[in-house]
Amino acid sequence: MGKVAVGAAVIGAAAVVGVAALVVRQRMKTSGRWARAMAIVKEFEEKCGTPEGKLKQVADALTVEMHAGLASEGGSKLKMLISYVDSLPTGNEKGVFYALDLGGTNFRVLRVELGGREEGIIHQEFAEASIPPELMCGNSDALFDYIAEKLASFIDEEEQRFHQPAGRQRELGFTFSFPVMQTSINSGTLIRWTKGFSIDDAVGQDIVAELTEALRRKGVEMRVAALVNDTIGTLAGGRYTNNDVAVAVILGTGTNAAYVERAQAIPKWHGPLPQSGEMVINMEWGNFRSSHLPLTEYDHALDVESLNPGEQIFEKLTSGMYLGEILRRVLFKLAVEASFFGDVVPPKLEIPFVLRTPDMSAIHNDSSSDLRVVGSKLKDILEISNTSLKTRRVIVELCNIVATRGARLAAAGVLGVLKKMGRDSLTEGGEKTVIAMDGGLYEHYTEYRECLESTLNELIGEEAAATIVVEHSNDGSGIGAALLAASNSLYLDQ
């Protein structure tokens, strides 16, 4: 064998060894990255832990805060607002009632015909309109005149059979989803605008009086019988069809709860006791916070960077506005610290709120063998292509961690309310307590809903769980408001 041949053989062997070493190094680098990624996931899972004992501590803390909020204004992070709703629908209401639902840049007007116990809701219809941007920052008269005009058109087009008897005014339930200090069932002062509205001359004014004046200017004969929020509307809608409904919970973009309290158990109530002996309380429970809540570095960062740091902590752990964003923050850390999606951090992953909770729900719900929904969501939303099955499985598991924590904490919240009402254990009569639930998160995120309901059963125990029923109650902000107009009508005895 010549020297050249020997030299070539040596060089060839060295090249093979070099390539092998490179492959080994690459594998070691990859396995090192994967180990780091798994460590991040494991730590996140541990910090999000919601064992039964912790959830019961959260429930007890909520009950304590409920007592404090009922004792005095500002006594708790929970506002425990007196709604002035002391008579919920019974199912006996009859007649035609209206609702106005103003919750953002769109509003709805509804008409509901009620036929009493036998016929229930005979007819319902609605019209929707968007508010022109210039009216969102103009003056109060311009906004309410525009709304009154739409109401007038809605009424002008209605059939003869919906007309009121002689001497009877039309009555309206007004769902107004902005911060209000309520002063009676049909009056309340606007505290501040949110959701892009900025109409300075309406702040500090009675919002019902503003609407009533606009209706008068437009020649609409209509009385505002009830001013409500969507959670109390959900409670009313639930009670109309089921007399055992005593709690309402909204789990959507945000979250809130309302329940029926004994009037005597409200120390800050200074008026005459209502005839019913009861009062609906709007908890504003999204603002609940406790040292027992399992917060992670991602939650702290999300809170600090939010528009309302230190506020709505419970909402930031449990509601649809935030679950997808928590997931994005974990994925971003995996990308930066463990090169989870390759050597380059995907630019889209740096954008806050780019990953919405409905997308997270679709990822979580993917039952295909190759998790193709996960792959297409990553590609369409984050522009991340060619992910391995192993990577996709981790992402599904992260969805499960985030959703499970949120759903189990929401269930602990419900337990806290039931404790305050004395409904968390089996009663002698075995009376049922029905919780009316609404909101897109509860309705559309199957894993979240199922986890919430199974956790509630776990916390209450098998015996008592037989007396606690969770029902989906739809459109509290619309039908619920019309029903509250009916139950607070001037013409109840007619």
Image: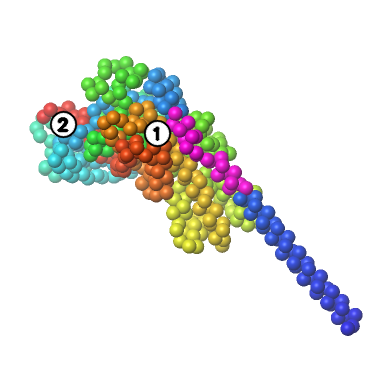
- Dividing the picture into quadrants, the one containing residue 63 is top left
Instruction: Specify whether residue 385 is in view.
Output: no
Q: What stretch is highlighted in magenta?
A: 39-60
Q: Which residue corresponds to the image point at 27% horizontal and 33% vertical from the top-left?
A: 431
Q: Is residue 141 highlighted in magenta?
A: no
Percent x, y of residue 405:
48, 42
Q: Residue furthest right?
A: 3
Q: Which of marks 2 and 1 is in front?
A: 1
139 vs 85, nearest the viewer: 85
| Picture disc at residue 415 | 1
Name the image quarter holding residue 5. bottom right
Would you call the spot at circle 1 few (<14 residues within 10 Å), some (14-19), or many (20 or more)?
Answer: many
Q: Mark 2 points at which residue?
A: 169
Q: 23 above or below 134?
A: below
Helix, strand or loop for disc 1: helix
Indicate the quadrant where residue 13 lies.
Answer: bottom right
Q: Which of 45 and 314 is in front in this view?
A: 45
The residue sitting at 53% across, 57% down in the picture is 392
Please name the colour scheme applied to the rendered image. rainbow
At 44% from the left edge and 51% from the top edge, which residue is drawn?
A: 361
Left or right: 437 in relation to 396: left
In the rendered image, the quadrant that contains the N terminus is bottom right
Kind of residue sitting beneath label 1: Leu
Identified by mark 2, the residue type is Gln
* Nearer-the-camera pick, 292 or 186: 292
Q: Which residue is rendered at x = 10% and y = 34% of the image?
A: 165
Report how far apart the C-alphas of labels 2 and 1 lie in the structure: 42 Å
Can you give x and y, in whole percent of width and height, for residue 379 in the image? 52, 58
> SS for tag 2?
loop
Which of the marked residues, 2 or 1, is nearer the chain's N terminus? 2
